[in-house]
Amino acid sequence: MSTDHAGAATAPDGQLSPRLYNADLAPPKQRRWKTYSIFALWMNDVHNIGNYTFAAGLFALGLGAVPSFFALLIGVLVVFWGMNLMGRMGQRTGVPFPVLARISFGVHGAQLPALIRAVIAIAWYGIQTYLASLAVVVLALRIDPALEPHTRNSILGLSTLGWICFLALWAVQLVILSFGMEMIRRFQDWAGPIVWVVMLAMAGWVLVLSGGRIAWNPPNALSGGAMWWEMLGAAGLTISTYGALMLNFCDFSRFSPDRRSVIRGNFWGLPVNFTAFAMVSITVTAGTYTLFGEIITDPAEIIAKVPNTAVLVAGALMFALATIGVNIVANFVSPAYDLANLAPKHITFRRGGLISAVLAVVVLPWNLYNSPATVNYFLGGLGAVLGPLFGVLVVDYWLVRRARINVPDLYTEDPAGEYAYRRGVNPRALAAFLPASAIGIVIALLPVFAPVSAFSWLIGAVAAGALHHLIADRSREFTDVSGEHLAGDTAAEGIH
């Protein structure tokens, strides 16, 4: 096998299509993501302001510490199960999400799920970078109040200081990402644990000041049926929160050397680490009610109350680092692969990442974030279809094909190829995906379904999976062929 200047491979038999294959989309040569790297991935994804405020918000809504713990545990156990299913699919085949989607949707039909995932990730990549930059703006003003005049103007909706802080964080992330998946692994291996230092320090500070007198139940504590329904809703939202990453977790697990590394990393990173982080968040939140007489769900506000500039600087930097970590894991790797899948001959992982980063600025994410209609209807609507995609992929792989995958055929346009279907598109997968997506969107967006909107991802996944299992083509034998000989021709895990 040889590789041209763009990274697209050509085989002597002419079967590998440059429209479907490059070294970044191929199974990797080296697999270095062992248990700790998967665990660190989840630390980076879990340790962020969004998850903190989510857990703290349950306390504010009336769930005590114990009901919150069980609600989050139920939700994260479902996530753990889903991540293990998708993780095994990636680890066994060695392919990223857009290539894995070819199994169910066809070698060309997979562009649809890949583009949906890419659009969501790019939008949230920009939004998360913007949210992290807000903390840097506050930090800059605390260090040098003379910068305040630079916050009064507006350039495309953002002040001069806002632009400087946003672009600074944008550039830091781009530098990390430009070195590929191996650099991402090294970054997350040490970045994730650092946030625990800040969280434990906050918890210790609150416990000391309160003398250990923590109100484990909020003043508006729920009971009876209202409590149980809120717990179920919290579990459903936990599942939905991880629905996007559950879909493309194979982008990371494909670099794991064995199944045990994936399962162990998922166990320590999800049921253990997630619930521990959530309970520390709730402890701090409950402590703020004891100390200040109000429930504070924003960790930045809590840090701001610490009468020490050095502590404020350290805390703000750590939470900015946490946001960068979750952004890289959840919102960058996916579109880099998804865009590479559009034109493998011309777009590598690195180029796809650069395009994603540029688009994340072009969409002016602060305007997206400040528009509830955009977030709720556009991004919320797209998010509702992730469940049906997961349902189709998992049912097709595990129940229809029984994990028998012909990896080389994922890269061929030969009409006789196993994933050619009808001109490269599987109409049966679309027939299961589209109606289930419509159901998910309706439940997620229409006010009349607000009481069950937290379960839109789960309902969509079950509906699509059941329908696909019913109509899938079982008339032919499925082959099981590994793709080890297709491994990328580069020295560092198939990354240029």
Image: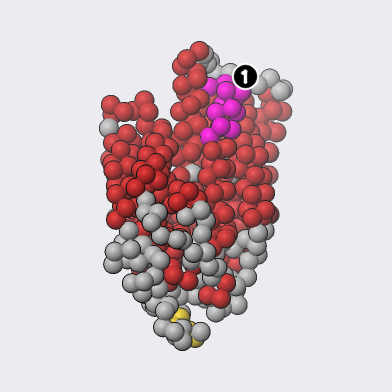
Q: Judge by depth and name the residue closer to the eye, 466 or 296.
A: 466
Q: Residue at x 61, y 36 (%)?
A: 275
Viewer-nearest residue: 335 or 168: 335
The magenta segment: 61-75
Report if residue 80 lies within the magenta region. Answer: no
Residue 28 pos. (x, y %): 57, 70
Report helix, strand or loop for mark 1: loop
Tell me if I can see residue 320 in this picture: no
User: Within the magenta stretch, is there residue 74?
Assistant: yes
Could you say where residue 187 lies in the image, as x and y percent from the top left? 61, 60
Q: Is residue 317 above or below residue 238?
A: below
Q: Classify residue 373 as left or right of residue 88.
A: left
Neighbours of disc 1 within 10 Å: few (<14), some (14-19), many (20+): some
Q: Quadrant of residue 470?
A: top left
Point 65% across, 21% down: residue: 214
Image height of 347 relative to 53, above or below: below
Where residue 186 sits: x, y (%)? 63, 62
Under mark 1, the amino acid is Ala
Query: In the figure, is residue 371 to the left or right of 49?
Result: left
Residue, x 59% and y 27% (percent of image)?
70
Q: Relative to residue 446, is residue 378 depicted above or below?
A: below
Q: Is residue 32 above or below residue 212?
A: below
Q: Residue furthest top?
A: 224
Q: Nearer the viewer, residue 147 or 109?
A: 109
Q: Magenta residues: mostly which secondary structure?
A: helix
Q: Please tell me which residue is depicted at 37% across the width and 39% down the height of the picture.
A: 463
Tally the numbered discs. Answer: 1
Residue under pointer 1 = 215
